[in-house]
Amino acid sequence: MYQSAIQNLINRLSRLPSIGPKTAERLVFYLLKRPPEELDQLATAIINAKNAVKVCPSCFNFSESIPCPICSDPRRDHSMICVVSKPQDIASLEKTGSFPGVYHVLGGNINPLENSFPEDLRINQLLMRIKNHNVREIILALNPDMEGETTSLFLINTLKQNPEINITKLARGLPMGADVEYADEVTLENALRGRQKINLN
Amino acid sequence: MYQSAIQNLINRLSRLPSIGPKTAERLVFYLLKRPPEELDQLATAIINAKNAVKVCPSCFNFSESIPCPICSDPRRDHSMICVVSKPQDIASLEKTGSFPGVYHVLGGNINPLENSFPEDLRINQLLMRIKNHNVREIILALNPDMEGETTSLFLINTLKQNPEINITKLARGLPMGADVEYADEVTLENALRGRQKINLN
């Protein structure tokens, strides 16, 4: 329908996640109305990201330096490894500013329906890190859903051969701003089971 | 939070319409996992679109040739001009394959709340086209909403000084697949008012 340069950009953009053909069309027409410098800058930002971003060989987070700033920071506690499924999860956890340890990106979850098996995840690399460093605690920070739970269970079974390591997982309970009335049963059950003592001093 | 090349691309992408910071983040992490050629191709597609796409000086549609393929097509009826607010509307109308005339892109609607006034639209250019060519019909194809109606009314008032021109607008009624039970009153009223005689032969 459109001429080739427009259609080509629409096609490229509509391959991106959460962007359908109609959104791609809207993006392209938005871009065409912007000053040409902005399009140059966007194209340059893509090329720069491609060239600058590498994968940290220790934690497998994306990074512009090797090892990544977290793994190379001597103030971080390298005996605590927080296991996440994807790099974005690290960004969210870092925003809390309350985790002193380091991370390990699995690169997904176990999900046989989508052909994702334990050998597709960076589990061996995690075991190597444990073997080569003095690791005290592994914090499982996987999503509270079917795939995350399956992956956690698999990791717990694999890791329990190292009895000197504490295995923990993120607390389950009511999220901030939730309404008890509308919370689902599993969340409420987790919130009850994990109830915390209030200090009355 | 992120390092500079990643954060810069997130910032650039989150300026695009319908892409918030979270979607931009997801897009960037998706892109970083793709083969590097794909990022090159996306950047190239943006640059190519920027370089190849111009604005047709006659109808103001985006085009890679000047005048655009529609304006330069001798088989199109140049005495019928369909007035649209944006280039995407032309693409949708062309998909029907049932309009033999040419187009005119206003470049928006009259919307004083968003500082869009008649002088910001390509109304003078439309009047020039009418003056210089033998125009028989102007079809108003603006959206059936407040801004579209305001713009249509303004155009009707401006154009009625040329009594030789038929001014028409797109039919109003039930959209395909609609349910009479759930149609809003204005749509139903329009559908009733514009009811069409069924030919019983």
Image: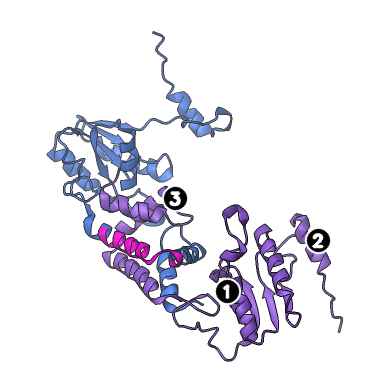
Chain colours: A purple, B blue
* Mark 2 neighbour class, 10 Å CA radius: few under 14, some 14 to 19, many 20 or more: some
Q: State the SS at label 2.
A: helix
Sequence-earlier tag: 2 or 1: 1
Circles 2 and 1: CB atoms closer than 8 Å = no
Was residue B36 drawn as part of the magenta stretch in this picture? yes
Name the residue located 16 percent from the left edge and 46 percent from the top edge. B67
Q: Nearer the viewer, residue B41 or B55?
A: B41
Q: Chain of mark 1?
A: A
In the image, is A82 to the left or to the right of A23?
Answer: right
How far is mark 2 from mark 1, CA to CA? 27 Å
Q: Nearer the viewer, residue A120 or B84?
A: A120
Residue A20 - label? 3
Give the image quarter of residue A179: bottom right
Residue lying farthest to the right in this orientation: A200
- Under mark 2, the amino acid is Glu
Q: Chain of mark 2?
A: A
Name the residue located 57 percent from the left edge and 56 percent from the top edge. A115
Circles 2 and 3: CB atoms closer than 8 Å = no
- Under mark 3, the amino acid is Gly
How far is mark 2 from mark 3, CA to CA? 38 Å
Q: State the SS at label 1.
A: helix
Q: Is residue B86 visible?
A: no
Image quarter where the C terminus of chain B lies is: top left
Give the image quarter of residue A77: bottom right
Sequence-earlier tag: 3 or 1: 3
Q: Position of residue A42 (x, y in %)?
A: 34, 67
Q: Which residues are magenta?
A: B32-48
Which residue is disc 2 drawn over? A189
Residue A90 - label? 1
Q: Main secondary structure of the magenta part?
A: helix
- Under mark 1, the amino acid is Ile
